[in-house]
Image (tube, helix red, strand yellow):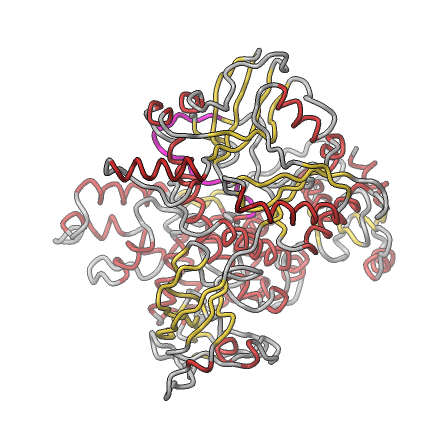
Amino acid sequence: MSQLRSQPVDALSRAEAQQELEALAQELAAANAAYHRDDTPEISDADYDVLKRRNADIEARFPDLKREDSPSEKVGGPLAEGFSKITHEVRMLSLGNAFSAEDVTEFDARIRKYLGLAADAPLSYTAEPKIDGLSLSLRYEDGDLVYAATRGDGSIGENVTANARMIASVPQTLRDAPQVLEVRGEVYMSHADFEALNAAQAEKGGKTFANPRNAAAGSLRQLDANITKARPLAFFAYAWGAQSAALADTQMASIERLAELGFQTNPLTAICDGPADLIDHYAQIEEQRATLGYDIDGVVYKVNELDLQARLGFRSTTPRWAIAHKFAAELAWTRLDAIEIQVGRTGALSPVARLQPVTVGGVVVSNATLHNEDYIAGRDAKGGEIREGKDIRAGDWVQVYRAGDVIPKIADVDLTKRPDGAQVFEFPKTCPECGSDAVREAGDAVRRCMGGLICPAQAVEKLKHFVSRGAFDIEGLGAKQVEAFYHDDQLRIKEPADIFTLRERDAAQLTKLKNREGWGDKSAGNLFDAIDEKRKIPLNKIIFGLGLRHVGEAASNLLANTYLSWQAFEAAMIEAGAREGSAWEDLISIDGVGEVMAGSVVTAFAQEAERASIDRLIAQLDVQNMPERDTSGSPVAGKTVVFTGTLEQMTRAEAKARAEALGAKVSGSVSAKTDILVAGPGAGSKAKKAADLGVETMDEAGWLALIGA
């Protein structure tokens, strides 16, 4: 169960945010694999959407903590084995989510702002049921179906052409279609067909399915297309990818054209004028949900005019012009059996509720994070009451909530069912793992073990982080293996450098790794080889792998792309250790690096024991420099640029990305090293300081002219 926090995102400390982003990345990756690859989802769609929304909200508040493996940069999941792969000519993206009428209104407002439209200007949308099935892309050339592919990870999908040909509602040929046309939609199974399939499977002793979505996905991914043929699958078309000629000028007209070409389209798709109409149509579809005969989990809204869709464009994984308005999830009551304390790699003491298993929204919940001592006591981060001030105790009857902005959490406690003698939970003041003091610093909601390297829980968690996917990602050396090696008396791994001496130490042992339980000659050799492959490692990976507090994958990339080499990075961090002078100023001036993060990094290099551990690790590695961009001919290559005020033709993030792509360094503050200040309306102190320092200042139009945009 994901260790999620209950307090609002704006109440999270940086440390809490970083810890939660790590937990979210792990749980969402597992959920993606279970849903997209294995067709056995472990959490409901509503729960998954809330997790992603929580992740996005935290990243928006702490952009420098964004991880390289951030779920916001992922579409779909890993590919299933057994199928050849197809690269999508046009990526298959996911959708952003709305959970309330306010979210829909904000969606409309964002679009109007981006397009420069007044609040009362006409702007139409389409609204259609969101089918709970498996995404499929069908490519037609000269009217013939040439291949079909699942969404996969958004860029590459599984080749399921033979299977798709077995679906009656997938046309094999088209008349009067564009020369190239990729039709996209959802493979699904009706409720009636699902029940009939499960009954037939049970009668012959075969596998039964948990829900129609699983049945549809499992049926489409059969290596034997004859099995797919025997399954009652259907296909709704609602979108397109590559096309040699446009189907129509609007979303609605394009859907109607798909219907004319022979595709099944959803009859509940409608045109709506503005958010009020969208919300009304949502309510109408929700009322019909139980009688549709197939599963839906929301309503999708899209800007109707295709030229406006083109202007709005895309974020990294979602279109700006569409959003999915999801249906709500559920609540459940259960008994809280115990409260346990876990110690993370940063020393954070995290309380976990052990629950009597209960099904919430189709998922069995047996534990949930209790966030911190304030949350258990019925207080928020500012001392205000939550749950009407009711504390949480072992033995309590608690309500588990799996929707909204946080899941899972204990939404309420039924005091009428509290057992006699239930004790107030006393949060430990010492670490349960090593006995060191557990200190709660001023302004921090989390109590932390001060044991550092002597705390086995921290050491193990740091090692698990070191070998995680976003860091060194050593094949065959996961969390389970790390823990076993940490407790191995002969081949102990107590710090990252020990991983790279494992082969040498094994050779010197009388009892070899291959002779230990769970290992053989081949698996041991494979592990040693996998470790050696990671001796050559990019700079951003080593920075992230160090597990420095407040430094996530996005920040690691930022630091690596700034300093480019380990030697330059190390020298700068050592010099910045005094927290004054040019090295420190350069560090904190990096756009996205604040004083808290900078302080965490330089502290690591200033502490003798940690620095010695880092030095031992670097001695085992060949750290690769970051590639320098080819910015020949760029008018701003090598220059330091600061953006201030309101940008009207692009977002701040877009401006930063464009400047960096041209070889400029984007800083968050003006100094004597600043070359250009781009000042929009509302520019304040930065513009004055730039003028005092004689820094070249230009408006947004001047900047766009300079870079040729």
Residue 100 can be seen in this image: yes
Among the 4 quarters of the image, the one containing residue 523: top left
Camera-nearest residue between 537 and 197:
197
Tell me if residue 539 is in the magenta stretch. Answer: no
Tell me if residue 77 is in the magenta stretch. Answer: yes
The quarter of the rendered structure image containing the C terminus is top right
Q: Residue at x 52, y 35 (%)?
A: 154
Camera-nearest residue between 297 and 410:
297
Among the 4 quarters of the image, the one containing residue 655: top right
Q: Report x, y in % for residue 630.
A: 63, 33
Camera-nearest residue between 348 and 578:
348
Residue 519 is left or right of residue 22, and the answer is left
Residue 583 is left or right of residue 519, and the answer is right
Residue 605 can be seen in this image: no
Kindly give the residue lying farthest to the bottom in the view shown: 421
Q: Report x, y in % for residue 331.
A: 49, 63
In this picture, is 691 found above or below 430?
above
In this picture, is 540 found above or below 228?
below
Magenta region, residue range: 72-86
In this picture, is 555 found above or below 450?
above
Q: Report x, y in % for residue 693.
A: 83, 57
Camera-nearest residue between 137 and 82:
137
Main secondary structure type of the part rendered in magenta? loop
In this picture, is 473 found above or below 443?
above
